Image: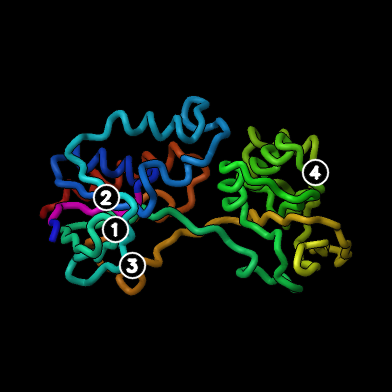
Amino acid sequence: MIRTDILIIGAGVAGISAAKAAADAGKRVVIADREAGFGGVLRQCSHRGFGDNMTGPEYVQMLLKGIPDSVESFFNATVLEVTENKTALVSQKEKGLFEISFSHMLLCAGCMEITAGMLPIGGTRPKGIYTAGEAQLMSFKGEGFKSPVVILGSGDLGLIMARQLKEQGCEVSCIVEKNDAPGAMARNRGILNEVPLILDSTLIEVQGAPQLQAVTVQNIISGERKTIPCKTLLIAAGLKSDRSLVRGLEDKDWISYCGNCHKIYPMVEGLAADSMSTARAVCERNW
């Protein structure tokens, strides 16, 4: 069994920031992540806007410059279970199953996207429906999309993906937003000069089999409906904190939440600062 003062689950921006703060405070730190290395979702964010106008990978490399060598990391490692006796069961290809015993755990597992299945959308479930995050990863891998594209949600990720798809030569028919104004920050709204934004509206049905052929959009105020032909639908309906790993243990005082596990942050800089602050506060407790 591996023993440590602090176990950090998640090696994205929150995990890196928390690990730096805890190690600098003199604590033994172990960090585990199911991916192959540090960075989390930012590794697939090729657009600029992180820190001093960096790409996601550049921002991650900037953070890693200050991480102490004493931090022990396990990658391609899935934490299967966390028990009440402060033990995590981990599965890793190289080591198989093993346990990590800790005094305090910092959950930095990030957040989950709201999927089409979580929304009151009728119709079939054809090919061509993705969350914006899935589409971002596919774009990062060089995979293409069928045009035309409809995007549900005008938050930052939705508009960033609209920009990326346009740059790849995809036809983006429209962006559908349930509120009366776009939700993205001003710096990402330039794409709205090129792509129509349908406000006060929501998507109520998808049509097509096996490939998506169209979506039906309804105005929330007037009730008016219209059908929009499309081959791809991107769901950018929002995020929620992912605490599923510790379900039933949420009230334990030996678990703290960092970054998007704490709350959803609009800016990565705030997420990093929150994680460092939380880790420092944990380290200042009487152990």
Query: For the residue marked with disc 1, what is the amino acid?
Result: Gln
Whether label 2 touches label 1, CB < 8 Å:
yes
- Camera-side residue of 94 and 240: 94
Q: Which numbered circle lies on residue 171?
A: 4
Which residue is painted at 58% across and 53% down in the image? 134
Q: Which of marks 3 and 2 is nearer the N terminus?
A: 2
Q: Is disc 4 placed on a helix, strand or loop? A: loop
Q: Can residue 205 be seen in this view?
A: no
How many C-alpha atoms fall within 10 Å of the one at disc 1: few (<14), some, or many (≥20)?
A: some
Look at the image and say whether residue 145 sits in the magenta stretch: no
Q: Is disc 2 placed on a helix, strand or loop? A: strand
Which quadrant of the rendered structure holds the N terminus? bottom left
Find residue 69 and report its horizontal and vertical position in percent. Answer: 19, 35
The residue tagged 3 is 246
Q: Nearer the viewer, mark 3 or mark 4?
A: 4
Q: Earlier in the sequence, mark 3 or mark 1?
A: 1
The residue tagged 1 is 92
Which residue is painted at 82% across and 64% down in the image? 216
Which residue is painted at 70% across and 70% down in the image? 125
Q: Earlier in the sequence, mark 2 or mark 1?
A: 2
Secondary structure of the magenta portion, mostly?
strand
Query: For the residue marked with disc 2, what is the amino acid?
Result: Phe
**What distance separates the C-alpha of mark 2 from that of mark 4?**
42 Å
The residue tagged 2 is 74
**What distance separates the C-alpha of mark 3 from that of mark 2?**
19 Å
Q: Which residue lies furthest to the left in this view?
A: 287
**What distance separates the C-alpha of mark 3 from that of mark 1?**
19 Å
How many C-alpha atoms fall within 10 Å of the one at disc 2: few (<14), some, or many (≥20)?
A: many
Q: Is disc 3 placed on a helix, strand or loop? A: helix
